[in-house]
């Protein structure tokens, strides 16, 4: 049985109920079970770290993934959805280092790797419960039981297998490379990690002199923003093609007024090979190998600095390359890198030993100044990389690392990228494509502890190398079986040398955690050790989704590994979302507290509202979103509440139909009759067009086109279909038409719930759990339909699509909206009727469409007459333009005055052309829609002064706005109706509740009072409740009352229970009756038999009539024949009692009267009192003569029970 829908709803608490329902029914697992034998749709979930709480970025990506996977499930696929966890790497280690106060490798060595990793393991899943709760609260269905974690030994074993494949293909090598280095985490980072966290910073900017050896009076001057690299300077570099100048200071003056004398210009190549004095003596011996000379290279640019770049080859990638090319350093030499893993100077730099490099900057500048080498010191704002984990500045530093060759396969990467479908498409070609074109070899080793160890065992001289690809191979070579591959379990294992080099030991490095997440397609199923066929049949994945930052992270590592391993892309389709920023456009920051807690947003507005807000925003097009709480609130106000009210209105009228017409509503799509109502046809067509569009766009993964259409559909349904068909849905145009409208509304709401289910899983489930009781079980295809998420998406019923009707209604909507604008402009509320609306359109077919919907236009605009025309000249309409002073004044400045004069001279024809084109040239300036305001005027001679006009590009609407007293009166009556309906709503009443409205307008006889009296029937026709003047009967059960002001009068309204329509005096029985004449044994008798009692109930059929006659006339078993032309359910409120029957016999006394009254109204167990007046003030005396009551109306008072009292 369909349940009554409450007027108010708390969406978050309803969502909690739905979560309980899903949990009780285990709905997600049931979905998977039901779809097990369907075609497979593969989805990879990128693994987050559980060391922090989920934020809006996670919620957004999770929502996109949930929508797409739900859509494909409802499209007939089996969609396995497993949650993944990134468990290794810097995020975990950084937390432990902070907690335990670990400063560097020495501290870890003291506590031991086993203990350190134990600490890491203990916090890996610190927030996993919060994650699971958050993901489930957001309505996302994903399997947490059958998850994957990068720390599972079987996952790590596949990572080893992946690496072994790369090693065997010759794609792995060891080298020294200048890399981004995190001093806080003591480890190098890959280039894509370094690119994740750039910030604008102020760094010291110094210009330093380098006197030439040949003439110390001449010095080269170089610029740097990293003074800490100067102690490691080994060369200077200039651009051979650039022009340089030699200048001489003319005289000494304050810095701001320094004057130089230009000596001569020369190309940079002139300086090549010139030697200069070292800044510091720490590495002076390097001069023997050619250090401290000028080199040339085209990487030096003229845009910044002095054109002379100082070279510290182990702290800059270009420096390293150039110095290697000139043999200043050799690749196999010991690096000149006097900075340790914590970023502090080592003992070679005696003046600054132990100082953190960034802190040493000021001391180095001071030293330069004291030693006459500083030309200028200032500060410089620029974009600088920070560690994505510790949020500390990175330095560039040469470190020995293990690399995967990537540069040689750039073309293959680009080719495979071209086979992937990206949404939005520009990410593939621009951001990701550009990154791939510049791809560098990937440094995959990290000098850390908590991670998957790199499975390479080497001899002491690195000449003999063994790479291991499985646990079985490790056992075979070491003779020891292990079940966990973390460092503490395998670092001590050795492999005997095959070349007589003693034993091979494992290198100390672990994998970059991005290598692990890039291996997840294989590792999550323990490929190739298990599930081989299952993986190979479903690779590449059908779908993945993450944020745009992953173009340099997960998307990249997935592509590199799948290209290297299998020569194919890892996924077919990918949705890339933008970043969610704080409302001020800044990055969301816990420290700044510049964004609302996601948990509190869900608590306040619900998960569905947050989901829809995020998905219906630029962020799904890979643009950034400034998160605003009011945006989530608006989703409730503008989408969910109207949608909920349409659903509530449907249920109310289904229940009213059952109560009033005894018709039990059941919907069956296969047997539902096709309505001939144009608005029914329109909304059905609009719905089917939406389903068609929805399926096509969802298959193209364009969520950003789908959601606006769904939101627009809610508007069309609630503000157009329901609004214009309220009377039909309430049954005011007959039962058959009401059923058509209800079937249409049900069909549309049911389709909408199924379409919206992937986007808003809660509200659709809530509505469906009630609506499903109105579905004919015979029409249900699914075996189990107990959740909306078990149902397939609706099929497109193309026979219902009628583009002509959709176009006609669209035109009608334009007319109505233009008319509303005119009313708003003239402050004429729609309650006040107007005489005429004129619609002017050049296309006669369009006018026919508008005419076919005349009824709705008249009703919505509340006008009496619609006039259609193709001739605007008949009404003397002209266009004129006014400039937007703010916009144009600012842009045109001095020319504004002249252009304004020319704008006012533009003809109506010119402005009509402007309307169509959207631009116009005035005095040589191109003007657009935002620059001009168009207004309509009427020729005085046309006699159209009573009209006000407005138009869009297609149609022109004129509204007759002249006042008319009868229309004004009707408008006031509508105001009264509005007050009554609002009061009804305040009293939580539904249309089927029987009520009476009492009113008092003071002063009596004034305008308002006279309008109400004159329009009582008009008000009754809408409110369907009797409207009576005060006083309210003392015995009336008052529901709600209110005093209000209207048109200068005090209006008092009181709503009471029950319909108290005034009854005409009764001259005979109130109920249907029949007069009878009976002749038995020559004795004639006359009597009356009531065919119903009370009115409308206890109806007699022929058998009951015979029994009644036998009883009344005492005919006993005599057979009766009737000659004419023609469960106790006592619930009526009017009945008739016969005081004698037959004539002169069976008289009732006072006691009998009470007894019969109780029988008729089903009040046998209750105490009653009878009264002669409606106000229940004159009780019928017990000794009064019953004869005196003939044809009188008595009123019954039911006395309360002791429980009620």
Image (cartoon, grey):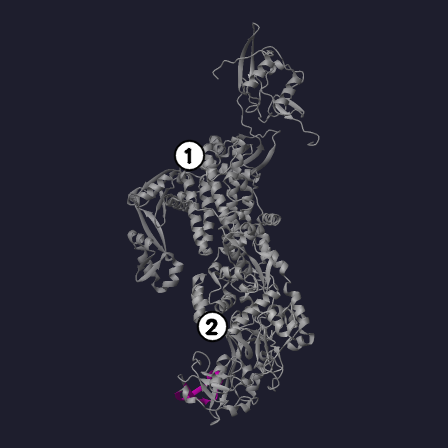
Name the residue: 38% across, 58% down: 885
Q: Is residue 331 visible?
A: yes
Q: Is residue 230 magenta?
A: no
Q: CA distance from mark 1 to mark 2?
A: 80 Å
**Of residues 1092 and 501, the one drawn nearer to the viewer in this rendering:** 501
**Is 589 situated above or below 479?**
above
Residue at x-position 68% and y-position 71%: 115
Q: To which quarter of the image does residue 993 belong?
A: top right
Q: Nearer the viewer, mark 1 or mark 2?
A: 2
Question: Is 248 colored magenta in this rendering?
Answer: yes
Report the quarter where the C terminus lies. top right
Earlier-in-chain disc, 1 versus 2: 2
Measured as percent of width and height from the top left, residue 189 is found at 55, 73
Residue 470 to residue 984: above or below = below
Q: Which residue is mark 2?
A: 439
Quick one: 225 or 408, which is closer to the camera?
A: 408
Which corner quadrant of the image does residue 85 belong to?
bottom right
Label 1, secondary structure: give it: helix
Number of numbered labels in the structure image:
2
- Residue position for label 1: 966
246 is higher (above) or lower (below) than 193:
below
| Residue 1095: image location, x then y, percent | 55, 23
- What secondary structure is the stretch in magenta mostly built from? strand
* Residue 101 locus on image (x, y percent): 67, 73
- Estimate how packed mark 2 is, as few (under 14), some (14 to 19) or many (20 or more) residues with alpha carbons within 10 Å: many
Q: In this view, which residue lies farthest toward the right?
A: 1202
Along the line of sight, the residue nearer the viewer: 235 or 802: 802
The span shown in magenta is: 244-266
Q: Secondary structure at mark 2?
A: loop
The reply to whether residue 101 is in sight is no
- Crowding at dot 1, Cα within 10 Å, few <14 / some 14-19 / many 20+, comes out as few
């Amino acid at each position: 049985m369909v349940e009554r829908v409450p007027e108010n709803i708390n969406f978050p608490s309803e969502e909690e109920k739905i979560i309980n329902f899903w949990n009780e029914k285990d709905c997600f697992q049931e979905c998977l079970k039901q779809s097990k034998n369907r075609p497979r749709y593969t989805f990879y979930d990128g693994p987050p770290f559980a060391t922090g709480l989920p934020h809006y970025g996670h919620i957004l990506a999770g929502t996109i993934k949930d929508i797409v996977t739900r859509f494909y499930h409802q499209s007939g696929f089996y969609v396995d959805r497993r949650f993944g966890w990134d468990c290794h790497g810097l995020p975990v280690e950084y937390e432990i280092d902070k907690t335990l106060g670990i400063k560097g490798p020495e501290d870890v060595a003291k506590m031991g790797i086993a203990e350190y990793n134990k600490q890491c393991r203990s916090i890996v899943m610190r927030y996993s419960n919060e994650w699971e709760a958050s993901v489930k609260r957001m309505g996302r269905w994903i399997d947490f039981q059958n998850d994957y974690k990068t720390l599972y030994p079987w996952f790590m074993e596949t990572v080893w297998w992946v690496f072994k494949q790369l090693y065997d293909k010759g794609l792995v090598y060891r080298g020294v490379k200048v890399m981004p280095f995190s001093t806080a985490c003591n480890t190098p980072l890959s280039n894509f990690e370094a690119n994740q966290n750039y910030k604008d910073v102020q760094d010291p900017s110094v210009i330093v002199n380098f006197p030439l050896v040949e003439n110390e009076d001449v010095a080269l001057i170089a610029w740097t923003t990293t003074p800490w690299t100067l102690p490691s300077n080994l060369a200077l570099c200039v651009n051979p093609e650039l022009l340089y100048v030699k200048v001489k200071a003319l005289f000494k003056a304050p810095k701001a007024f320094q004057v130089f004398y230009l000596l001569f210009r020369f190309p940079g190549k002139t300086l090549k090979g010139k030697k200069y004095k070292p800044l510091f003596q720490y590495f002076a011996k390097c001069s023997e190998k050619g250090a401290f000379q000028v080199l040339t290279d085209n990487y030096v640019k003229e845009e910044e600095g002095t054109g002379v770049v100082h070279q510290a080859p182990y702290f800059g990638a270009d420096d390293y390359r150039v110095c290697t090319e000139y043999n200043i350093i050799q690749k196999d030499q010991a690096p000149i890198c006097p900075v340790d893993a914590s970023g502090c100077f080592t003992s070679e730099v005696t003046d600054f030993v132990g100082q953190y490099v960034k802190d040493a900057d000021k001391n180095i500048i001071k030293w330069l100044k004291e030693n006459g080498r500083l030309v200028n010191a200032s500060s410089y704002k620029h974009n600088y990389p920070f560690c994505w984990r510790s949020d500390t500045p990175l330095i560039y530093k040469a470190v020995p690392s293990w690399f995967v060759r990537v540069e040689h396969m750039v073309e293959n990467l680009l080719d495979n990228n071209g086979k992937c479908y990206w949404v939005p498409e520009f990410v593939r070609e621009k951001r990701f494509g550009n990154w791939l074109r510049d791809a560098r070899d990937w440094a995959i080793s990290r000098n850390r502890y908590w991670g998957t160890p790199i499975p390479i065992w080497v001899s002491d001289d690195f000449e003999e190398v063994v790479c291991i690809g499985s646990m079985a191979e490790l056992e075979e070579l070491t003779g020891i079986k292990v079940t966990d591959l973390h460092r503490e379990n395998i670092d001590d294992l050795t492999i005997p040398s095959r070349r007589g080099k003693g034993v091979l030991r494992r290198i100390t490095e672990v994998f970059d955690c991005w290598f692990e997440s890039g291996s997840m397609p294989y590792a999550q199923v323990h490929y190739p050790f298990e599930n081989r066929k299952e993986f190979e049949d479903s690779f590449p994945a059908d779908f993945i989704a993450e944020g745009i930052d992953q173009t340099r992270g997960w998307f990249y590592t997935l592509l590199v590994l799948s290209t290297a391993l299998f020569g194919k892309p890892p996924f077919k389709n990918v949705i890339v979302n933008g970043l969610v920023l704080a409302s001020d456009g800044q990055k969301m920051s816990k420290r700044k507290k510049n964004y609302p807690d996601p948990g509190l947003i869900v608590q306040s507005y619900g998960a569905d509202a947050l989901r829809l807000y995020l998905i219906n925003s630029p962020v799904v097009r890979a643009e950034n979103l400034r998160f605003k709480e009011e945006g989530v609130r608006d989703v409730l106000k503008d989408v969910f509440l109207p949608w909920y009210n349409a659903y509530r209105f449907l249920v109310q009228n289904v229940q009213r139909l059952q109560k009033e017409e005894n018709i039990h509503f059941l919907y069956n799509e296969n047997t539902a009759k096709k309505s001939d109502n144009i608005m029914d046809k329109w909304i059905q067509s609009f719905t089917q067009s939406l389903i068609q569009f929805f399926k096509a766009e969802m298959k193209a993964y364009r969520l950003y086109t789908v959601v606006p259409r769904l939101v627009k559909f809610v508007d069309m349904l609630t503000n157009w279909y329901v609004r214009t068909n309220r009377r039909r849905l309430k049954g005011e145009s007959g039962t058959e038409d009401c059923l058509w409208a209800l079937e249409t509304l049900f069909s549309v709401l049911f389709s909408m719930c199924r379409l919206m289910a992937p986007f808003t899983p809660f509200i659709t489930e809530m509505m469906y759990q009630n609506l499903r009781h109105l579905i004919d079980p015979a029409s249900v295809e699914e075996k189990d339909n107990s959740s909306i998420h078990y149902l397939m998406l609706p099929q497109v019923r193309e026979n219902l699509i009628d583009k002509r009707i959709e176009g006609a209604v669209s035109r009608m909507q334009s007319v109505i909206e233009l008319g509303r604008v005119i009313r708003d402009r003239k402050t004429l509320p729609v309650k006040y009727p107007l005489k005429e609306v004129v619609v002017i359109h050049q296309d006669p077919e369009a006018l026919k469409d508008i005419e076919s919907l005349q009824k709705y236009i008249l009703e919505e605009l509340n006008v009496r007459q619609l006039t259609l025309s193709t001739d605007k000249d008949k009404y003397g309409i002209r266009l004129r333009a006014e400039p937007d002073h703010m916009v144009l004044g600012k842009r045109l400045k001095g020319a504004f005055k002249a252009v304004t004069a020319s704008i006012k001279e533009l003809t109506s024809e010119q402005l009509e052309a402007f309307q169509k084109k959207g631009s116009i040239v005035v005095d040589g300036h191109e003007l657009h829609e935002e620059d001009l305001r168009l207004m309509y005027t009427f020729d005085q001679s046309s006699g159209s002064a009573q009209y006000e006009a407005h138009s869009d590009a297609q149609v022109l609407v004129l509204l007759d706005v002249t006042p008319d007293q009868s229309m004004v009166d009707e408008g006031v009556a509508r105001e009264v109706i509005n007050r009554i309906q609002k009061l009804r709503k305040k009293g939580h009443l539904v249309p089927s509740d029987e009520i009476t409205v009492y009113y008092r307008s003071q002063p009596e006889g004034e305008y308002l009072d006279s309008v109400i009296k004159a329009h009582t029937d008009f008000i009754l026709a809408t409110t369907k409740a009797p409207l009576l003047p005060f006083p309210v009967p003392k015995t009336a059960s008052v529901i709600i009352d209110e005093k209000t002001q209207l048109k200068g009068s005090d209006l008092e309204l009181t709503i009471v229970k029950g319909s108290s329509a005034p009854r005409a005096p009764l001259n005979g029985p109130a109920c249907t009756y029949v007069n009878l004449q009976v002749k038995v044994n020559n004795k004639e008798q006359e009597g009356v038999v009531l065919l119903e009692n009370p009115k409308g109930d206890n109806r007699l059929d022929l058998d009951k009539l015979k029994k009644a006659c036998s009883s009344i006339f005492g005919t006993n078993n005599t057979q009766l024949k009737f000659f004419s032309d023609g469960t106790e359910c006592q619930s009526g409120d009017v009945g008739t009692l016969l005081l004698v029957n037959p004539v002169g016999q069976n008289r009732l006394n006072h006691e009998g009267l009470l007894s019969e009254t109780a029988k008729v109204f089903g009040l046998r167990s209750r105490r009653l009192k009878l009264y002669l007046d409606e106000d229940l003030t004159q009780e019928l005396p017990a000794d009064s003569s019953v004869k005196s009551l003939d044809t009188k109306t008595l009123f019954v008072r039911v006395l309360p029970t002791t429980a009620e009292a």
